[in-house]
Image (spheres, rainbow, N blue to C red):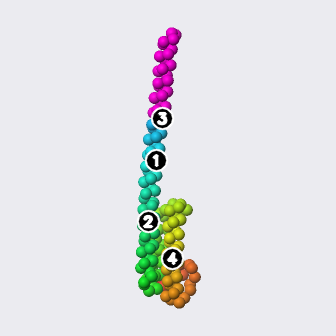
Amino acid sequence: MQPAVQLKAMKETSLKKWVIGLTVTAVGLLVLSGYLFLAKGWLTIRVAWAEEQTALFQKMLDTALPGDAHIAAECLGYVEGYYPSGSKQVTGSRLDRIVERERTRVSRRIIDHLRSQTGQDLGANPNAWIEKYGTR
């Protein structure tokens, strides 16, 4: 084989390798961008759910505090039963921990309100308060 033909064959082989390498890289980047797009979309949805959940807890607290024991117990029941951990958020995730921390904070505030309003202490378990003062 003559040197010119060898050089041309090497250039074609190198060019094919470059085209294959660039194609694989482009496909990889396309797959990665699709994954990131979907991941960001789900994160946006989960953040919106967390905001909605914590806002609802605050609304229940705002409703419970001026109300009587029956209303407060109903609000407490709603807070405790509203999309428990693992239903809207991934169990143990950062957003789940934020939501559950807010649920606990609001439940404690409502229980404190029930204690002061009724003069009784049924403990920290929300179910005891819900059973005694909630809808029968």
Q: Residue furthest bottom?
A: 119
**Residue at label 3?**
24
Q: Position of residue 91 (x, y in %)?
A: 53, 62
**Above or below 117: residue 63:** above
Amino acid carrying label 3: it is Val
Crowd rating for badge 4 (residues with CA inside 10 Å; few <14, some 14–19, many 20+): many
Amino acid carrying label 1: it is Tyr
Residue shown at 53% from the left, 85% from the top: 115
Q: Position of residue 36 (x, y in %)?
A: 46, 48
Q: Nearer the N terminus, badge 2 or badge 1? A: 1
Q: CA distance from mark 3 to mark 4?
A: 54 Å
Q: Is residue 131 visible?
A: no
Labelled disc at residue 51: 2
Q: Nearer the N terminus, badge 2 or badge 3? A: 3
Question: Mark 2 against mark 1, which lies toward the viewer?
Answer: 2
Q: Is residue 39 visible?
A: yes
Labelled disc at residue 107: 4
Crowd rating for badge 2 (residues with CA inside 10 Å; few <14, some 14–19, many 20+): some
Q: Say whether marks 2 and 1 touch (CB < 8 Å).
A: no
Residue shown at 47% from the left, 44% from the top: 32
Q: Position of residue 69 (x, y in %)?
A: 46, 85
Q: Nearer the N terminus, badge 3 or badge 1? A: 3
Q: Is residue 4 magenta?
A: yes
In the rendered structure, which segment of residues is drawn in magenta? 1-23
